[in-house]
Amino acid sequence: MDKSFDVPERLALKGVSRRDFMKFCGLMATVLGLPMSFAPRIAEAVAKKRPTVVWLHFAECTGCTESFIRTTYPWAADIILDIIDLAYHETVMAAAGDQAEQILEDTVKKNKGKYICIAEGGIPTKDKGVYGKVHGKTFIDIANHVCKNALATICVGNCACFGGVQAAKPNPTEAKSVAEVTGLKTINVAGCPPNADNMVATVVHYLLLGKLPALDDKGRPLFAYGYLIHDNCPRRGHFENEEFVKEFGDEGAAKEWCLFKVGCKGPEAHNNCPQIKWNQGTNWPIGAGHPCIACSEPQFWDKSSPFYVGS
Amino acid sequence: MARVVVDPIPRIEGHLRIEVEIQNGKVKDAWSSGTLFRGLEIILQGRDPRDAHLLTQRSCGVCTLVHSLASVRAVEDALKVKIPPNARIVRNLTHAAQNMHDHSVHFYQLCALDWVDVVSALSADPKKTADLSAAVSGRPQSKKYYEGLKGKLKAFVDSGQLGPFANAYWGHPDYKLPAEANLMAVGHYLDNLRQQVHAAQMTAIWGAKNPHLQGHLPGGVTVVSQLDADRISQYLFMLQEQIKFIEEVYIPDLLAVAGFYKHWGAIGGNKSFLAYGDFPLSDKEPESFYFPRGAIMDGKLALVKVDPQKITEEVYHSWYEGDKPLHPSVGETKPLSGPALKGAVPNTKDKDGKYSWIKAPRYDGKAMEVGPLAQCLVSYVGGNKEIKDTVDMVLKKLDLKADALFSTLGRLAARGIKCLVNAKAAEKWTMDLIENIKKGDTRTFTSYKLDETTNGQGFGLNDVARGSLGHWVNIEKGKIKNYQQVVPSTWNLGPTDAKGQKGPVENALIGTPVADPKKPLEILRTVHSFDPCIACAVHVIDPETNEVYKFRVS
């Protein structure tokens, strides 16, 4: 790449001002729980190099990719074109068929041990994994090849982290997490899907500090998953005052009382939704009067359901 | 004769494999295979019916929301629940925003690179590009802007790290746009990545978050106090911003690009179409649908009434057990396993070979195309004036006859037309919401009883971004006894049936010219025009048989 052409300069050409860029760096500092004085260092870190990223799709719904492109400051185009070298990503890449496969092979070979693998989706293992294939290869073989040759594997979403929806009982395809299939220790950006800010922050953390963020015992970055939803819920006061929504659409719902008695799983869910919210801070589930379903927890489709309590 | 396999098909949701047989430069036969099976319908059995909308929404994160809608409607039908007007309108507004997101992202991110040669943009003259944008686009850019964009592209290419643009079919002889049009389109490709963020944001206003909204449930919606002036005006202003983008950028680009590809108005068509219709304007369904329900049979532009009882699914060429077409209310999802699955390697050689995880839905025994083209054709003959006027305007501007709609080009045009008409209708529905709230109606939820004595059967038919989507639920003792989803990409990407009748994508591919079997760009064009979503439809795999002609281009 043209080294003299730094990120803010490249972004400026597309109408992203330096102010926008610093706003992103400030946001990242906040998400990562760093003092704002770190913002310039983040700017410096992302401006320096474009690390190669390979993004794999297994048994999934592409919701994590969709969530990722909801990022702003920087916008997805800026990340894809200016901050990282997104060598392989089936949902956005122009190349098809054998030409696509060629890119994957070449990238793994040329950047062995140096690229970041982002994995989206669980891996079916029944019948040697024939329930999921790309280019005639099972997801099991792809994961063992591509994840194992990466510098690090970042799992995005509950499927890659913990098996996800296809692993819910009775798990017809014996779907498993990427870590279970490959034996690797993965960074697990959990959620169904994860918030774009947390995905971007995980990558930025690596670029900034040259190492991956501190993780909890389930592999989740502590900066995002270190607290319970319940602990930071703006409706917590109503919980303490025993002011509960008893049925959807009731007086308590209109007054935005606590959703615990209609099924909210906030007390068992580790995530930063109340702090950063979703879609540029527009809203979040409890904000919209819907119970939290604990989508960042392993096996939440079984352990947290039924999601609605009472009738 | 050459066999060409394209796997993976990029820029779609999910894992799709397309195999074609080429003779004398044209596709002679085609096979569409889904290469992933997840088994969501099996997982749903025994669960609380109210949870189904959360789980089925995970069918797809690209067409997020729509399975939630189909599911809550199916459960409401089974429980005989009528939702309040506010809930109906909020669902319509959120669904409309999702369409604005989905259709524009399809045009710019998923299919544009089949028609726009990014490498050719490098030789564009910035001044001429500015002149072109002033002539055709509602959002013209300056010479300076295009100099910058071109410089940026050049630096990107010179870096050797081509990212998502690497190894594509650039330079293919059927890329017809002048360099300047290519450069203008690249600019809008990047602009769309910003615009889609705001469209998704609109769905979160009352749907909590996107992807995978959490604001619906059987009985209505969960927001109550958030139906306030602040949020309604936020929706309305963001909607106007979307309409401007569609009018000033999307539609002009569509017309400009289509003008260079008129020959695609005679390629890739089907003859029979199905549209369930959608956007209820009262609690009368389907009578009050803004986009009406109906079918078009055998290329005849006349409305045929739809009877949901005539819908069946069969698995003759799919990796499932079963030997006869079944109505979804009694449908089965029994995947083959072990030796019977034979490694799930697509067998397209034998007459009874199985080659896909996608089932084959039929209406009255016929393969039906679904999607924006079906919706536009049915709305055109079904009395939707806005659709009729917009279709006529587009045909006139492109100087094409109505039969050109039955094509790959028609499919792309219909998506833009529907997107625009839907967005403008949403403006009126926002006013309906305001009027209803002004009358003092704040209800958003209808309560109902659901316990171990609850039994019922129901279905929800929707017409969403990719076409006709149906969920069928059977509730026994308060739990899901059976659940079947028949989704748009199952209709479109499904395999051949027992009678030998091809699925719509397979049929559309037959006759498609392929200039260079090593660069099957034309196949991508027609496949992408359907906007496949394979996680919904299920999934595919690629065999490494010797007969298959493996192509490799550097």
Image (spheres, rainbow, N blue to C red):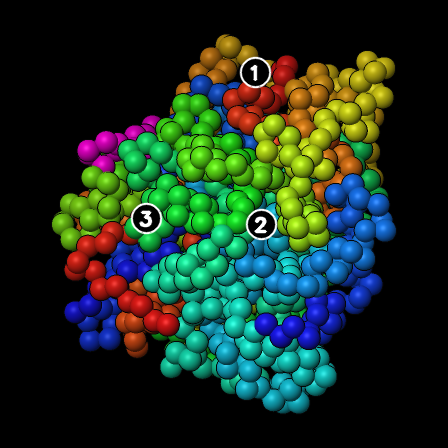
| Number of the front mark, 3 or 2 | 3
Q: Which residues are magenta?
A: B325-341
Residue behind mark 3: A137
Residue behind mark 1: B450
Residue behind mark 2: A66
Give the side of residue B266 with respect to residue B107, left or right: left
**Chain containing the residue with disc 3:** A
**Chain containing the residue with disc 2:** A
Q: Quadrant of residue A31?
A: top right
**Chain containing the residue with disc 1:** B
Q: Quadrant of residue B331?
A: top left
Q: Amino acid at mark 1?
A: Leu
The answer to which of A33 and B343 lies nearer the viewer is A33
Q: Quadrant of residue B402?
A: bottom left
Residue visible at 62% across and 75% down? A2
Gap in angstroms between the C-alphas marked 1 and 3:
45 Å
Residue B338 magenta: yes
- Extreme-top residue of the structure: B453
Residue visible at 64% across and 63% down? A49
Asked if residue B351 shows in the view, the reply is yes
Disc 2: CA contacts within 10 A as few (<14), some (14-19) or many (>=20):
many
Disc 3: CA contacts within 10 A as few (<14), some (14-19) or many (>=20):
some
The answer to which of B300 and B329 lies nearer the viewer is B329
Gap in angstroms between the C-alphas marked 3 and 2:
25 Å
Q: Position of residue B185 (x, y in %)?
A: 58, 74
Residue visible at 56% across and 32% down? B54
Residue A278 magenta: no
Does the CB distance between marks 1 and 3 fall below 8 Å?
no
